[in-house]
Image: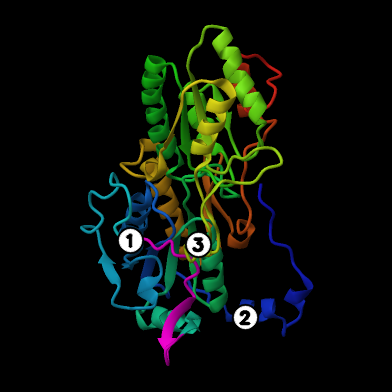
Amino acid sequence: MPPTRKESNDAKDSTSPAALAAANRVVATPRTIRRIAVSTSGGDAPGLNAVIRGVTKAAIQKYRWEVTGILNGLEGLIDTRRIMPLGIEQVRGIMQKGGTILGADSSGYPFNRRVIRNGEAVDLDVRNLIKQNFHYLGLDALVCIGGEGTMAIAHELSELGIPVVGVPKTIDNDLAGTDYTFGFRTAVQNAMEACDRLHDTAASHHRVMILEVMGRYAGWIALNTGISGDADIILIPEIPFDLNEVNDAIIRRQRRGKDFSIIVVAEGAHEAGGSHIVAEKAAERQSDMDRLGGVGGWLARKISEGTGMQCRSTVLGHIQRGGSPTASDRQLATFFGIHAVELIAAGQFDRITVLNGTTITDVPMDSVIRQYKQVDPQGQAVMFAERLGINFGRPNQEVEL
């Protein structure tokens, strides 16, 4: 379970920033709510439209609220022309579609806007503008759908006095506090199908085939893809790998008459004592973090040198998060949307919907910020995979096939 919020001395000091923020928060009740808004931020994921549909239908059919869609992340709260009404007709037939009908913005921190004044670039703080426009649009609550970064932004909105409920979204499944996030199972399905196809060409040409999948901090996609896609080697961020062990595992397979190997690697995987492979530096992409990528190509070169085998790398990229969501992702996303509406009706803000076992519940928003749920290197899934003979770039204490 994620850590719960603890009372601090700031809460007792009425002049502290925390106390002032708490005093600034708006408390809404079902009687005061007439119109709510929903936004999608960060990268797209299968199931976003299902959340939008769940929020809209629950809000209209149960509470008779109006629903407004904020376009392109929070852009509609900065430029109030970028909104759209959401009704039953607008959300009809969208659940099975990938992406988001509202558009998304993954450019980073939305509260600073760069403008040119007197020939110079100036960063403007637009927090007050966002709050003013929230009230100008007649909104009473906001549902923010996004990943950890979006939840941090939503928490700041809450401290501004905007009633906010969060819905977690990441195909990486690395958000703390929830067992699963929607989009993850669809991403694994897409990656597994790619892995299946790579088996055919690997066997035909007697090659090592590498499939690079997403997973900056956590290897959930790589782990589940590798197990379900019959990979021989899985490399994840949580288990820094020994390149010599990877090469030796491939050579041992050769000696047993297995003339091809399949490797699934997360983009954030790296050598023990090494660093991530960076595709684009943060400064180059005007972001607060580097864009990872290229570990598959790097591995292909190193494995060819170390084993003498032909080795090819495929980067699955954005294909993982495109397309129609699976049945389980549609259901989870829908239930998250409905529960977000129930939280608004109950006046429970600054909280995020989560899945705990088979139950949809919620936790404080600040309990998931700057925290990541990672694969346990000694956990059951890794242990079972090793019993199948899968190598993780470390000596397999179980068995190798």
Where residue 300 sits in the image (x, y, percent)? 51, 31
Where residue 338 sits in the image (x, y, percent)? 41, 53
Q: Is residue 398 above or below residue 303?
A: above
Pick the residue in front: 352 or 232: 232
User: Can residue 388 be spotted in the picture?
Assistant: no
Pick the residue in front: 70 or 247: 247
Residue type, label 2: Ala
User: Can residue 57 be spotted in the picture?
Assistant: yes
Outermost residue, right side? 9
Residue underneath mark 3: 150
How many other residues sit within 10 Å of disc 1, few (<14), some (14-19) or many (≥20)? some
Under circle 1, the secondary element is: loop
Q: Magenta residues, as a range?
A: 103-120
Pick the residue in front: 28 or 218: 218
Toward which corner of the image does residue 401 lie, by quadrant? top right
Where residue 396 sits in the image (x, y, percent)? 68, 20
Query: What is the C-alpha distance between the residues marked 2 and 1?
Result: 33 Å
Query: What is the C-alpha distance between the residues marked 3 and 1?
Result: 14 Å
Residue located 44% across and 70% down the image: 141
Of marks 3 and 2, which one's residue comes earlier in the chain?
Answer: 2
Q: Main secondary structure of the magenta part?
A: loop
Q: Is residue 105 magenta?
A: yes
Under circle 3, the secondary element is: helix
Of marks 2 and 1, which one's residue comes earlier in the chain?
Answer: 2
